[in-house]
Image: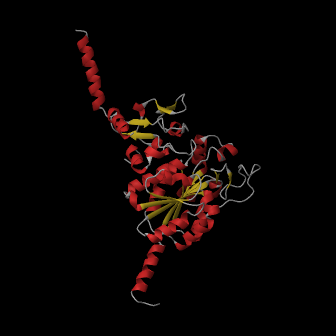
Amino acid sequence: MSEKPIKGQTKEEHCGAKKKKTPAVHIFPEWCKGCGICVAFCPKQVLEMGDDQKAHVIYPEKCIECALCARRCPEFAVYVSGDTIKESKKKSGGEK
Amino acid sequence: MPARLPYAYKYLRAKKKFPHVWCPGCGIGIVMGSIIRAIDSLGWELDDILMVSGIGCTSRMPVYVDFNTLHTTHGRALAFGTGAKMANPNLKVLAVMGDGDSMAIGGNHIIHAARRNMDITAIIVNNNNYGMTGGQFSPTTPQGAKTATTPYGMIEPDFDICKLTEAAGANYVARGDVYHVMELDGLIKNALSGPGFRVVEAMAPCPTNFGRANRQGDAVKMMELFKDNTINVAQASKLPKEKTEGKIVRGIFVDKDGIGYTERYQDLCDRVSSGVKK
């Protein structure tokens, strides 16, 4: 009995994540040189510098898709996608 | 969707040449992104475009974009571009130059390309020094600024790229900077979509050499300097002179539809071939 609701809950969460279109910002760590421009000029503080001197997405849910990070990135290491996170991950995997 | 992944992969030699050689925080990458977004919004075919460059940090740009590209000798981007344009007038020639490349070594070429109204779009990335060779002063280094070869401050006055090309007769002259990147996108798009010699000066930070010599801080602080020290031409005309003093004016200075050189040359060819002697 205890397993069923847990399964149901995970399914619901899973379905919810699929239906909801979350704006997503992605960073290619191989191209990022850690200049910090995207972090400094993000209007919603979505990004943060990591210990490895590269930008990391900390609050993807705050992203408003202004794409200023992508426009100002000198390394072409940031891109912003309006698709769901799952779809865009697939795309980035395929493009590489 | 201009600012997203597919544009980069369509226009860049992403698999072979990246990450690029420019220093962390260098503004040339941002200008390259602006050029790509402008071309993307115009919907041009990649094979119709020729990107010419000389030598220098900026002139490394043709290595990374997937147009027809030509990497030539120092300062001679416009000379080679003129030849290519006359050989194939259907090409859309885009000359990418640095400040030293265009103003010092290629200074003669730019004034004569502007005088002829050659149908070339010149994107001049101005980072105020020769970044590739270690930060020597260039003709656009501001008076008083320190560089590797002017440790006590530059004593020579600097060139104003926009005023120079305007006086030489260019069809379109504009200045943008990499902090106001949306504006720069628009300026480059305007520059690409018209006849005659069209110039965009894009101010970019050089945090490794110029920023370090002048203690301007890292790339982010240099970008903030552009935010604080520049003013749009429309705003500048409304404000009194005291408030705009010391600020760099950006925006469109000249925009006219003068007849380009290729059109005049085609007219000449038609006239002569139809048998009219004078």
Residue B110 rendering spot, x and y as whole percentages:
58, 66
Residue B73 location, quadrant:
bottom right
Residue lying farthest to the right in this orientation: B152
Nearer the observer, B84 or A35: B84
Answer with left or right where residue A44 lies relative to residue B135: left
Q: Is residue B216 visible in this depiction of the protein? A: yes
Residue A78 rendering spot, x and y as whole percentages:
45, 40
Residue lying farthest to the front in this orientation: B16
Nearer the observer, B195 or B78: B78
Q: Is residue B169 visible in this depiction of the protein? A: no
Residue B164 rendering spot, x and y as whole percentages:
61, 66
Answer with left or right where residue B155 lies relative to residue B7: right
Residue B181 rendering spot, x and y as whole percentages:
49, 49
Q: Tell me what residue is drawn at x 59 percent, y 54 percent.
A: B56
Colour treatment of the image: secondary structure
**How many numbered discs?**
0
